[in-house]
Image: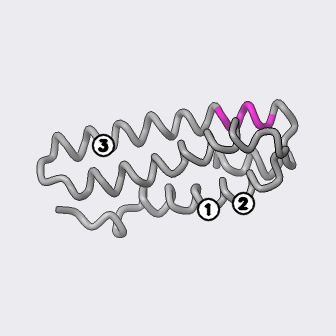
Amino acid sequence: MRDHTKLRAFELADALVLNVYRVTRSFPDDEKFGLTSQLRRAAISIASNIVEGAARSSRPEYVRFLEIAYGSAKEVEYQISIAERLGYGQSDTIRALSD
């Protein structure tokens, strides 16, 4: 079993979750169950899958969960681009989520 807290990918994913929550607070109220929810869930999924994969005993299972985390990261990337194009929040702040 691996210690997910020692993985740089987890550190980045964890920071992303916190930033996504901060940024989405300023999204319109009518997006509460739309883009806000989707973006938060996808960001949490990245970190959660890294944690779950690290807890798996076999390397193939670990890699599979990392692949799922990567897919969630691509979701977040797309959802950030939607938020930016819709003008939610400040463009610089939204764009910084992708860095």
The verdict on residue 72 being magenta is no
x, y (%) of residue 63? Answer: 25, 42
Circle 3 packing at 10 Å, graded few (<14), some (14-19), many (20+), is many
Q: Amino acid at mark 3?
A: Phe
Q: Which mark is residue 65?
A: 3
Q: Seen in the image, is 48 located left or right of residue 82?
A: left
Question: Could you tell me which residue is drawn at 16 percent across and 40 percent down?
Answer: 60
Q: Which residue is mark 2?
A: 22
x, y (%) of residue 5? Answer: 36, 69
Q: Amino acid at mark 2?
A: Arg
Question: Could you tell me which residue is drawn at 37 percent across and 37 percent down?
Answer: 68
Q: Which residue is mark 1?
A: 18
Tell me where the magenta segment starts and ends, as one range: 79-84
Q: Seen in the image, is 21 located left or right of residue 91?
A: left
Q: Seen in the image, is 6 located left or right of residue 84?
A: left
> Pointers 1 and 3 in contact (CB under 8 A)?
no
Question: Could you tell me which residue is drawn at 84 percent across and 42 percent down?
Answer: 88
Picture quadrant where residue 21 is located:
bottom right
Q: Secondary structure at mark 3?
A: helix
Q: Amino acid at mark 1?
A: Leu
> Pointers 2 and 1 in contact (CB under 8 A)?
yes
